[in-house]
Amino acid sequence: VPPYVARTTAAVVEVREGQNVTLTCRAFGDPPPTVVWRRQDRQIIRFNGVTGYGATVFNGSDLTIIKVSRKHMSEYICVASNGVPPDESWTVKLHVTFEPTVVPQAEIVQVALGSQISLVCNAEAWPRPLMKWGKDGQEIFNSSTFSFVC
């Protein structure tokens, strides 16, 4: 009997950075199938934090990642096989939520009087942050790019 994957983990899993997460892939068939996990982008799966041990393929039905970081955000694919075609796979998207971090640009920008300038604010966060520009404690614009004439 070819393998069958019981989709016990949601197709999209959201976890806060620093927490642990377990992705489960239960497979059935005759003979009993083996289950392997891999990342869709083929990066190494780090099981124990960002710098912990890892491999490109994880063998087993329960993939537990300790101290999830934003670098774990990816699609994870479990593949069940038992030698009876076809193999069956299941994809789980892992979203890691984390607070915004502004990516620094130039602190001082010089421009000639009367010319136009565009200031860009880049930030990393999940979900994507809402960008706002302010001056003297007042919001003046709500976009990642702010253009004006000096």
Image: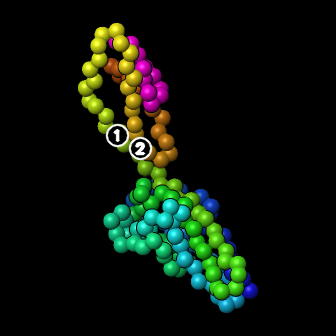
102 vs 1, nearest the viewer: 1
The magenta stretch is 140-150
Q: Does residue 42 appear in the picture of this structure?
A: yes
Q: Main secondary structure of the magenta part?
A: strand
The residue lying at 43 percent from left, 67 percent from top is 44
- Position of residue 135 measured from the top left corner of the image (x, y, whole percent): 35, 20
Determine the CA span between mark 2 and mark 1.
7 Å
- Residue 60 x %, y %: 53, 80
**Quarter where residue 72 is shown:** bottom left
Q: Are marks 2 and 1 in contact (CB under 8 Å)?
A: yes
Instruction: State left or right for residue 112 relative to residue 60.
Output: left
Which residue reaches farthest bottom?
Answer: 31
Q: Earlier in the sequence, mark 2 or mark 1?
A: 1
Mark 1: amino acid: Val
The residue lying furthest to the right in this view is: 1
Residue 95 numbered tag: none
Q: Quadrant of the N terminus?
A: bottom right
Helix, strand or loop at mark 2 = strand
10 lies above or below 3: above
Residue 103's disc number: 1
Find numbered disc 1 in the image and state the secondary structure of the residue it sits on.
strand
User: Which residue occupies 44% across, 27% down?
Assistant: 145
Q: Which mark is residue 124?
A: 2
Looking at the image, is 8 positioned above or below residue 100? below
Magenta region includes residue 87: no
Q: Position of residue 15 (x, y in %)?
A: 49, 58
